[in-house]
Amino acid sequence: MAVRYLVTSALPYANGPLHLGHLAGAYLPADTYVRFLRMRGEDVIYVCGTDEHGVPITITAEKQGRTPREVVDEYHETIHREFEAFGISFDNFSRTSLPTHHEFAQKVFLDLLGKDLIVERTMSQLFCPRCSRFLPDRYVNGTCPKCGAPGARGDLCESCGSWLEALELAEPTCSICGETPSPRDTTHWFLRLDAFSDWLREWLPAREGWRDNVLNYCRGWLDEGLQERAITRDIDWGVPVPLPEAAGKVLYVWFEALLGYVSSTRELFEKRGNPDEWLNWWKSPDTRLIHFIGKDNIVFHAIIEPAILRGLGGFALPWNIPANEFLNISGQKQSTSRGTAVWMGEYLKRFPPDPMRYTLSINAPEGRDSDFTWAEFRVRNNELADVLGNFVNRTMSFAFREFGGTVPESGAPGERETALTEAALAAGRSIGDLLGSFRFKAACAEAMALAREGNRYFDSSEPWRTARTSRDDCARTIRFSLEFIGWLRLVFSPFLPFSCEKMGRMLGVSGGSWDGIGKVSLVTGSRLGAPEILFEKLPEGFEEDGHANGPVESAPAASEILAAARIPFDDFKRLDLRVGRILSAEPVPKADKLLAMSVDVGEPSPRTIVAGLRQWYKPEEMAGRLVVVVTNLEPARIRGVESDGMVLASDGESGVFVIGPDPSARPGDKVR
């Protein structure tokens, strides 16, 4: 039987919008891989869905004064919509709150319970006297016992990636009220991970092609010794434990969420009218199950899920788990819970998806953490415009100007055309091998290298000269350049689906297989589509226009402001807003938008603050104005000037205007 590819991405929590770190870690590489497999004609399905249970959801709901159902309904739609806008091509995007998932998770629990792989135990658990309840993992904050980092949660330390138990934390506090909890006895059900130790020690080392970070992480867990792990929790939102004596308890989210891949597959085939077909995917030895995740999810997918599937018996086990490291932003970890991120939705309001898809692919955090900056984004966006976009534009312009917008007839290929065809064939094989082995960064780089070959061919063939001296030579150059656009369209399709769709419209073609790279396919005399600009270049310094959250070339509409992600009140309180008086202002050299201002904020010395206000205010208009200043931002160097703070301003269709307090306010007064 032919191989089948069952591809998944980690289920995102439906407790907030997603950021670029999510996209780069588990979704963009999976989508790239799946698109490549489809072009190769493989039998593949790609499933995912929102993780809608557990403590992250209930904490968000409590902080926002809403029900968990209201939270997950909102963010499921938001996440799904933004994935679609970025071109993430799921076959099914499900939800773990659906009845089909509840039923399957409960069935798995009872199956493992009947095999003595789940056991009942009495355990100590932290209890908050002020909230009058037991505290599940993420309701507890404290110091990590492994690395000593503060801010660890009761299930995970984000600093070192260790999976924790709440009782292990030093100096624990309730994340809701701040009270110090104390341990009390309660009853829970435990998964006997220790029963799978010997099998995992044999199975994991035999995995071929797995990344070192995955195997090394698992080796550390096995060396420490696997223990029984509680898989039930004392909360009222989740999959109920299907036992009469377990009233008020739910299945631990990381036990039942892993089963969401199965329930999403079941839902897919129910929608297709073949509800039993999921068995041919999950219970077939010919299925290659591939999980795309971030490194903080390795233990769940490489140890816990294989143990569960092994315990059930007959299920496909992970064939590969290409876990990525973290994508940081300017050196800081992106985090939904902390609100420190570049949000996918905010990016999409300002830019098309493909330049970011390319930036994250060429800078993928495959072997180590990578860093995202807006300066890097500008460089990569302009690289697309200068290399790929330039080749397509100049070829299409010649085809319309010299050959009436049709595919010209040409004679036999010459040396240049033969070399170009061989380069495309070689690149198709190499890029295919790289994509097949989950080396997306290298594959993307080779795709861009092939586009550069097109520009070199065009330059060396000089069609602007042969258009006057040899129409046959000019026709051959443009004909093979058009063919080359078609090959580039295929090569870049896994990375840049929207731009490649435009390229297809220009050539008058659609679809296409990976085997088409290097093969002549255009019909002589066929009409070409209208030329389209693939990529708009970004000017140098666009990211330094005075906005704190990245590049904003045009002011956001009111609807965009209202759609901004909610943040906890405690996050807002961290801002130190003060009244300031502008003492003087002067233009920043070689920066059309920037003013450097000396601002009195009630301190012994005035601060220098750079803001993108020059097109709205003359320097001499600024002196004496009262403004509101964010005083506890980290200083930033902007065009050679160190800026220590931010002046608040409104930003709308009518322009940008500084926000001023009442004239009776004095510099240094706190703004509440």
Image (cartoon, helix red, strand yellow):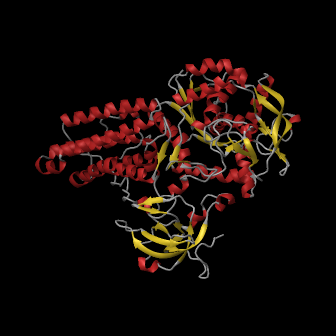
**Which of the image's four quarters has the N terminus?**
top right
Q: In x, y percent, where is residue 80?
A: 59, 48
Q: In x, y percent, where is residue 422?
A: 27, 31
Q: In x, y percent, where is residue 174?
A: 76, 48
Q: Residue furthest right?
A: 245
The total of numbered circles placed on residues is 0
Q: In x, y percent, where is residue 577?
A: 60, 67
- Residue 413 visible in the snapshot: no
Q: Residue furthest bottom?
A: 664
Judged left or right of residue 671, residue 230 is right
**364 up-or-down from 289: above or below:** below
Quadrant housing residue 617: bottom left
Judged left or right of residue 659, residue 240 is right
Residue pictured at 65% horizontal, 58% vertical: 571
- Residue 56 visible in the snapshot: yes
* Nearer-the-camera pick, 548 or 400: 548
Judged left or right of residue 281, residue 122 is right
Residue pictured at 41% horizontal, 60% vertical: 542
Quadrant housing residue 431: top left
Residue pictured at 47% horizontal, 63% vertical: 643
**663 up-or-down from 64: above or below:** below
Q: Residue furthest front?
A: 604
**Which of the image's four quarters has the C terminus?**
bottom right
Judged left or right of residue 93, residue 241 is right
